[in-house]
Amino acid sequence: MPTIRAIHPSAAGLSAEHASEVFDHIAQFASYGFNKSHAAAYAVIGFETAALKAHHAPEFMAAAMNMAIGEVKDLAVFAGQLKARAIPILAPHVNMCAARFAPIQGKTKRGVAYALAALRGVGMAAATAIEAERTANGRFTSLADFKTRMHGQIDKKATVSLIQAGAFDGLVASRADGVALAEERGGQVSVHQMSLFDTAPGIDTRTPLPEWSRAELLDREFDALGFWLSGHPLESFRPTRGAKPLTFVGALRGREHLPRQADIVASVVDWETKGTKSGKMMAILTLSDAEETFEAVAFEEEWAGMRDLIRKKATLAFTVQPGKDGDDLRITLTGAQPYTAPGLKKAA
């Protein structure tokens, strides 16, 4: 290894005064040149990312969602962006989806196939095992076939999560029946009935369980994914008029003049609290309605007044102060109250 030897400025033909002057120039440049070079690099990355998102949206969104596997709030927002751009999302399915998010070619346009590993209780190891088994030995033909081939690799919790997310649709009589089958020991379902053929292998004489209600389906889907994908509890909601009109947050987007206050209805996906620079507390909520998923903030005093109402899957009427953050809409929550509608499942 070569020896590094310090060279005195005078040895390079520079006086101490000139050397000090050169160093001062270098220090002066360093105070802004480093920042400018980073800003230029980030600008290039920003334009490249924007171009990918605009012209190759399924590929871009699949990559972004793969980076966020395990982060339910981010996945909910990404799924909302896909929905807003009318980009199809293929719901999780054991015969059509991979362990990770992937761009796919749909019937009319490209979309994104949901990742099996993103389901609660499944994880990357189990999802990879499902993908590997399907690749090696073909598509699964039924829940029983799945359980036989994946024995020892997929536990009951993961199987139930897959069924509730719709990953066995077409392979079970109903999701309710599939969950009942998955939760019974040895695959036998006890529905308080017996048959002479109950002990015969391969023969199922029981009556399949009927499907859950629409509200129950969506509730179970939330439990599996962490948010609503195939529908929303507010899908039948219609904006109301009157002294305090109630609407979705989308009605505020694109308005040239925002109202000082508005009332919206939305469901809670998740939330987190953090401290502000002034030492107070604020909450950042991930909310969704039948049109989109978005974030809103509540500051300490307002958060204290609504905290007891905030729970996952709760549907609430929020009073908000809308504002502009560049081209984006900024939502500040100032109040909340319970919202109920016919057929709306109440959060536990």
Image (cartoon, rainbow, N blue to C red):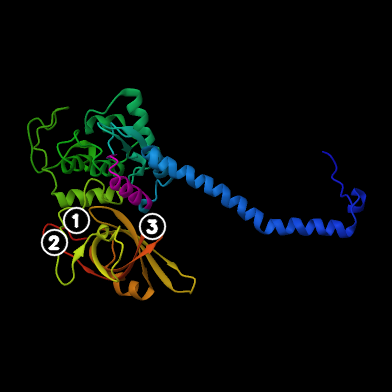
- Give the quarter of the image for residue 309: bottom left
For residue 134, what is the image quadrant?
top left
Q: Which residue bears the numbered disc 1?
A: 234
Q: Give the percent coordinates (x, y) of residue 246.
A: 19, 65
Q: Earlier in the sequence, mark 2 or mark 3?
A: 3
Neighbor class of circle 3 (other Cα within 10 Å; few <14, some 14-19, many 20+) is few
- Looking at the rendered structure, the kind of residue marked 2 is Ala
Q: Residues within 10 Å of mark 2 (few under 14, many from 20)?
A: few
Q: CA distance from mark 1 to mark 2?
A: 9 Å
User: Residue 152 or 14: which is nearer the viewer?
Assistant: 14
Task: List the single residue furthest toward the front.
Answer: 256
Image mark for residue 341: 2
Q: Is residue 30 magenta?
A: no
Q: Earlier in the sequence, mark 3 or mark 1?
A: 1
Rounded to the nearest whole Å, what is the CA distance between mark 3 and mark 1?
A: 27 Å
Q: Position of residue 118 (x, y in %)?
A: 35, 44
Q: Residue at x 92, y 49 (%)?
A: 11
Q: From the image, give the main secondary structure of the stretch colored magenta.
A: helix
Write down the residue under mark 3: 327
Viewer can see residue 306: yes
Q: Is residue 155 above or below residue 31?
A: above
Instruction: Work out whether residue 314 can be spotted.
Output: no
Q: Quadrant of residue 97?
A: top left
Question: In front: 73, or 249?
Answer: 249
Q: Are marks 2 and 3 in contact (CB under 8 Å)?
A: no
Q: Secondary structure at mark 2?
A: loop
Helix, strand or loop status at disc 1 = loop
